[in-house]
Amino acid sequence: MTAEGTGRKVHSLIDKVYHRTNLEMAWESVKANGGSGGIDKVTIPAFQTVAEIELDRLHEELKQGTYRPMPVRRILIPKKGKPNEKRPLGIPAIRDRVCQQALKNRLEPIFEPLFSECSFGYRPGRSTHQAMRKIYRELMDGCEWIVDADLRDFFGTVHHEPLIDMIAEQVSDGRILKLVRQMLEAGYMESGKKYATPSGTPQGSVVSPLFSNIYLNQFDHEMTSRGYRLTRFADDWVVLCKTQVEAAQALRDARMILESLGLTLHPDKTKITHIKWGFEFLGYKLKRGKGLSLSREKVKKQPKCLSQRQVHSIV
């Protein structure tokens, strides 16, 4: 991932992260998103009563380089649509969420122009509806073979050094890279014990979705440069192809690119399928057959009327 054509690299960014206005904006965002507290048991209402003091302290700690994030509080929650399976959720302390949001506020505008058009997850102005409209258009264009893939424990296996190197390609401020490393290596608390995090980025962290887009940006660009119709939303992705042969080659190339990033495909959850058999993506069921026919006009002009929980059958 490079800023090809920009010729720019950010050399000083930490002062913009700890700027009081940015911290206030970050706190307002964290407050609006809600959620429970971290291992310090400080809730959002409790933090609000001392917000001015905490923001001043956070400002000084980031300015002086003495900030240290707390380990996240880890809980296990059922996987969506798979109640018998669970996934870890990391819950940072409120003040650490404010710091993460402040960092995200400054990193996102730097990396957003570098991201591929095929990426839709957790990006400003992009949505699941747009991803599904892209897939619908490709189906209507005759792309009926689908690489339906699943990454094995993506958020738990992201390698820290390559991620930091990817950020360093655009940001040379060592204090920012140190802050990123601290967030990644903060560890987690579970059942009263602290565990190290030598790899991965916690699901539930404010900045994790941005980190995932940075990490997978190389995958996006390499796949699309080879002509594949990739649609990605965070760690969920599909490739639509016109032939089974193309789908098989797309899967081989995807596996090779992901392995170069230290990632692996789940062998039991990755397959090549056809629209007549159907596939699921982002909570939608897409399958040729009897059922609701979704017109091209409806997909283009009325995305807000569609619920992600609805099941659609495309004729």
Image (tube, rainbow, N blue to C red):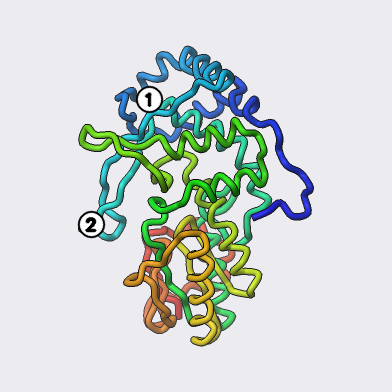
Looking at the rendered structure, the kind of residue marked 2 is Pro
Q: Is residue 124 left or right of residue 184?
A: right
| Residue that appears at 33% across and 30% down | 38
Specify the quadrant of the image occupied by residue 64: top right
* CB contact under 8 Å: marks 1 and 2: no
Q: Residue 263 location in percent, x, y?
A: 45, 61
Q: Look at the image and tell me in which quarter the C terminus lies.
A: bottom left
Looking at the rendered structure, the kind of residue marked 1 is Ile
Residue occupied by mark 2: 83
Q: Is residue 125 left or right of residue 207?
A: right
Q: Residue 178 location in percent, x, y?
A: 54, 33
Observer-nearest residue: 134 or 162? Answer: 162
Task: Give the mark count.
Answer: 2
| Residue that appears at 47% across and 77% down | 146
Q: Reading the chain from its start, which is encountered first: label 1 or label 2? A: 1
Residue occupied by mark 1: 44
Specify the quadrant of the image occupied by residue 31: top left
Mark 1: give few (<14), some (14-19) or many (20+) Cα within 10 Å. many
Q: Give the secondary structure at mark 2.
A: strand
Q: Is residue 287 left or right of residue 58?
A: left
Q: Give the secondary structure at mark 1.
A: helix
Residue 110 numbered tag: none
From this view, report whether residue 211 is shown above or below residue 189: below
Q: Residue 40 location in percent, x, y?
A: 32, 24
| Residue that appears at 63% across and 59% down | 116
From this view, report whether residue 50 is shown above or below residue 69: above
**Structural distance between the alpha carbons of marks 1 and 2:** 29 Å
Q: Residue 78 location in percent, x, y?
A: 26, 52
Q: Look at the image and tell me in which quarter the N terminus lies.
A: bottom right
Mark 2: give few (<14), some (14-19) or many (20+) Cα within 10 Å. few
